[in-house]
């Protein structure tokens, strides 16, 4: 019980870090539709993207299908109805009426990771716009060759401020805010790109998931992608096994047939191919065009490994940067070990996922629970065993995005019914105490919230 | 095999598994084919696989070696992640092979390796036998490709390189393999050949018809559900397959869920 842990902490049996982790896990486990907080969404279209800023964890940015983006304060309410429900109204709204606003749906809205002075929106009108939050003006915009599905900025970047954008075109483009130009064009995908995610451990590594079902890892300092995740390469368990003899052979097989790698493969798999001279001869006979030397950056474009049997609709990495979750339009959710590039074969129970639209997944920080928008509800899965932990039903229509705020253990979800719902921990002891305070007429306003 | 009633340890899905459950159930409740109601759930993947192999429906016109659908396996073993991992290790040990079916959704069929080889031999015989021009490719396939490539699909280049260990490979050879039904193409990628179980066309048709029929049967009911015991006994019009086979597959793929009621298990369409 809760008080037992407090006692143990008091006695010194439980350390501070453990105590905190246990408290967070318990609160995350008791999420339910919040009965004390709600957002008054001004959107007239489906909510497509949600993000809380990374510096303070205070402002929620949402992008919707009617071309509007809104910012809400998630800490302080703008008004309190009957002392119980704190209503949060939007602080800022940019929509089609704005002179430089987007004309079609906004598919992604992300904060500038360093501070909340800028935010970036990407829309189906083929533009990516950078806005100044205080003056609500567009500072710069980038024109893309197709509808933009995803935009992301690296949360740990210190030397660059690149926006990675993925559109219906096959190339991932990196836009630079500092210079206003496109700095990189990453080719390798064979169809549009639906989801992008920067690595949580390196500011140079970008992961992209495309409509061709492939997930590619790019190091932006080098040419070409250095890894393509293949769903048939798997490892049993969380960590890659020490003896990797079979996975190594598979890995070599899936590399492109460029001549240098093929000879390397022959050296390693010595005894399995009997007649190497005839092997090379038949290769020359049947695969003439493959003999040309490819630029090392393009060699991975021959690699056709897929990580899903459909489009990759959502990507999310865990905060420690070790695992990657991907959701696909084949209604599967897969967990990948980033270090070894293998599928960990965790089976997340059967579900139907929305196809055709990018989804936003969420993971708790100590990676224990994954939140996946599944048709009209959100399912929470235990990340290691894949069992359904809980289903959150509250939206009336398909859910598109969810964001988990680790500070207060709250989950925000946005759906096609134009609402943003808040799911917060519901430990009964605390709700009783909160009710008492509110009944004593204390305003929910924070006395520290003043400014000149 | 020993008499069916004692080798199946029956326990309902909700009660914890105990393998020594034989004595509790009176013999007159057990029929020759035990009902799905006393749902057979196991902790071990191999036991589930072998049991479902013996329960494979027998059709008069088609002779097919038994195979198991992956969704059926999910519905009868509790922990799905464990199932996936066990399948992966069995695959690496070359005990069984997994095939991706072309029936639309993410269906996979699991077949034991000896059954597969028997089926391949049968298909080769049916498709023209060993007197054809270029029929040595069947031997090459069995000797070189099957043991070394354990995945569901194979690249064009790899296929040629593996087959050419036996001799020169031409397009005619690959055509023979496809005509016999050992390799197919699917719409996903034009450069990849998929391994397939030959001559199971009527079964796949029966599978998709049967699924549609059971789902429409349940949808027509007022509360979209029916007792499992009466559902098992319904004879399907359009599909020659066993109802239990289809129900397991639908439960495993999540389209039907079972609810415990005082009169037994109820099968209901999942709504989400």
Image: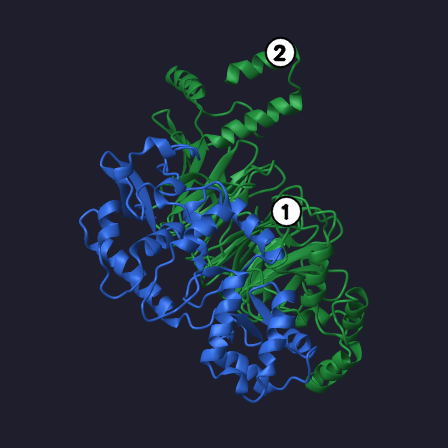
Chain colours: A green, B blue
Where residue A125 appears, as percent x and y from the top left, is 49, 66
> Which of A113/A310 is in front?
A310
Extreme residue toward the bottom, this view: B133
* Residue at image coords 54%, 14%: A4
Taking the image as drawn, is residue A147 in sight? Answer: no
> Which of A243/A358 is in front?
A243
Label 1 element class: strand
State left or right for residue A263 relative to residue B252.
right
Taking the image as drawn, is residue A343 in sight? Answer: yes
> Which of A413/B8 is in front?
B8
Q: Residue at label 2?
A: A10
> Eyeballing the image, is A161 above or below A82?
below
> Eyeballing the image, is A412 above or below B168?
above
> Eyeballing the image, is B165 above or below B71?
below
State the separation of the CA atoms marked 1 and 2.
35 Å
Where residue A329 appears, as percent x and y from the top left, is 47, 59
State left or right for residue B199 relative to residue A202.
left
- Name the image quarter holding the C terminus of chain A: top right
Extreme residue toward the left, this view: B222
Q: Residues within 10 Å of mark 1 (few under 14, many from 20)?
A: many
Label 2 element class: helix
* Residue at image coords 43%, 33%: B18
* Residue at image coords 46%, 55%: B70
* Residue at image coords 73%, 60%: A220
The answer to which quarter of the image holds residue A420 is: top left
**Chain that bears disc 1:** A
Q: Residue at label 1?
A: A323
Mark 1 / mark 2, whichever is N-terminal: 2
Extreme residue toward the front, this view: B2
**Chain that bears disc 2:** A
> Eyeballing the image, is A336 above or below B42?
below
The answer to which quarter of the image holds residue A53 is: top right
């Amino acid at each position: 019980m809760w008080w037992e842990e407090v006692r143990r902490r008091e006695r010194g049996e439980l350390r501070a870090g453990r105590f905190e982790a246990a408290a967070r896990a318990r609160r995350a486990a008791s999420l339910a539709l919040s009965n004390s907080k709600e957002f008054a969404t001004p959107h007239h279209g489906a909510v497509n993207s949600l993000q809380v800023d990374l510096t303070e964890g205070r402002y929620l940015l949402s992008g919707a299908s009617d071309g509007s983006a809104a910012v809400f304060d998630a800490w302080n309410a703008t008004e309190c109805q009957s002392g119980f429900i704190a209503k949060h109204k939007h602080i800022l709204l940019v929509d089609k009426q704005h002179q430089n606003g987007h004309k079609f749906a906004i598919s992604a809205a992300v904060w500038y990771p360093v501070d909340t002075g800028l935010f970036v929106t990407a829309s189906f009108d083929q533009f990516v716009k950078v806005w100044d939050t205080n003056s609500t003006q567009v500072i710069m915009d980038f024109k893309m060759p197709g509808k933009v599905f995803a935009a992301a900025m690296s949360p740990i970047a210190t030397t660059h401020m690149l926006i990675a954008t993925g559109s219906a075109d096959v190339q991932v483009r990196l836009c630079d805010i500092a210079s206003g130009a496109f700095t990189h064009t990453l080719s390798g995908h064979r169809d549009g790109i639906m989801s992008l995610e920067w690595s949580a451990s390196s500011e140079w590594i970008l992961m992209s998931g495309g409509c061709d079902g492939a997930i590619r890892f790019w190091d932006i300092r080098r040419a070409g992608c250095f890894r393509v995740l293949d769903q048939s390469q798997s490892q049993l368990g969380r960590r890659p096994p020490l003896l990797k003899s079979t996975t190594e052979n598979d890995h070599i097989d899936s590399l492109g047939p460029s001549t240098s790698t093929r000879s390397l493969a022959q050296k390693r798999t010595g005894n399995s191919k009997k007649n190497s001279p005839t092997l090379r001869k038949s290769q020359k006979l049947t695969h003439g065009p493959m003999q040309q030397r490819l630029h090392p950056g393009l060699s991975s474009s021959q690699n056709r490994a897929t990580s899903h049997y459909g489009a990759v609709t959502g990507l999310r990495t865990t905060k420690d940067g070790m695992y990657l979750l991907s959701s696909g339009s084949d209604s599967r959710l897969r967990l990948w070990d980033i270090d070894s590039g293998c599928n960990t074969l965790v089976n997340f129970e059967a579900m139907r996922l929305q196809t055709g639209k990018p989804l936003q997944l969420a993971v708790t920080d100590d990676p224990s629970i994954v939140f996946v928008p599944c048709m009209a509800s959100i399912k929470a899965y235990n990340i290691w065993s894949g069992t359904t932990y809980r289903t959150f039903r509250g939206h009336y229509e398909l859910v598109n995005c969810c964001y988990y705020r680790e500070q207060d253990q709250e989950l925000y979800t946005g759906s096609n019914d134009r609402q943003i719902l808040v799911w917060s921990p519901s430990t009964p002891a605390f709700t009783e105490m909160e009710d008492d305070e509110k009944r004593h007429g204390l305003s929910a306003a924070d006395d520290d919230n003043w400014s000149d | 095999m020993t008499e069916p009633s004692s080798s199946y340890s029956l326990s309902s899905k909700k009660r914890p598994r105990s393998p020594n459950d034989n004595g509790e159930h009176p013999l007159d409740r057990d029929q020759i084919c035990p009902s799905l109601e006393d749902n057979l759930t196991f902790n071990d993947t191999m036991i589930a696989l072998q049991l479902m192999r013996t329960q494979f429906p027998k059709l008069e016109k088609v002779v097919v070696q038994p195979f198991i659908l992956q969704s059926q396996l999910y519905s009868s073993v509790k922990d799905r992640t464990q199932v996936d991992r066990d399948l992966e290790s069995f695959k690496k040990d070359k005990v069984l092979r997994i095939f991706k079916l072309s029936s639309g959704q993410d269906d996979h069929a699991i077949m034991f390796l000896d059954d597969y080889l028997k089926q391949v031999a049968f298909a080769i015989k049916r498709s023209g036998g060993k007197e054809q021009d270029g029929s040595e490719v069947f031997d090459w396939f069995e000797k070189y490709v099957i043991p070394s490539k354990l995945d569901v699909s194979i690249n064009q280049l790899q296929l040629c390189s593996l087959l050419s260990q036996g001799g020169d490979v031409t397009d005619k050879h690959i055509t023979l393999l496809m005509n016999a039904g050992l390799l197919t193409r699917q719409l996903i990628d034009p450069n990849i050949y998929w391994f397939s179980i030959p001559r199971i066309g009527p079964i796949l048709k029966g599978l998709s018809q049967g699924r549609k029929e059971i789902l429409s049967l349940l949808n027509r009911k007022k509360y979209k559900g029916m007792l499992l015991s009466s559902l098992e006994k319904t004879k399907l019009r359009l599909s020659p397959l066993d109802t239990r086979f289809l129900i397991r597959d639908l439960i495993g793929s999540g389209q039907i869920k079972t609810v415990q009621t005082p009169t037994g298990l109820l099968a209901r369409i999942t709504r989400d």
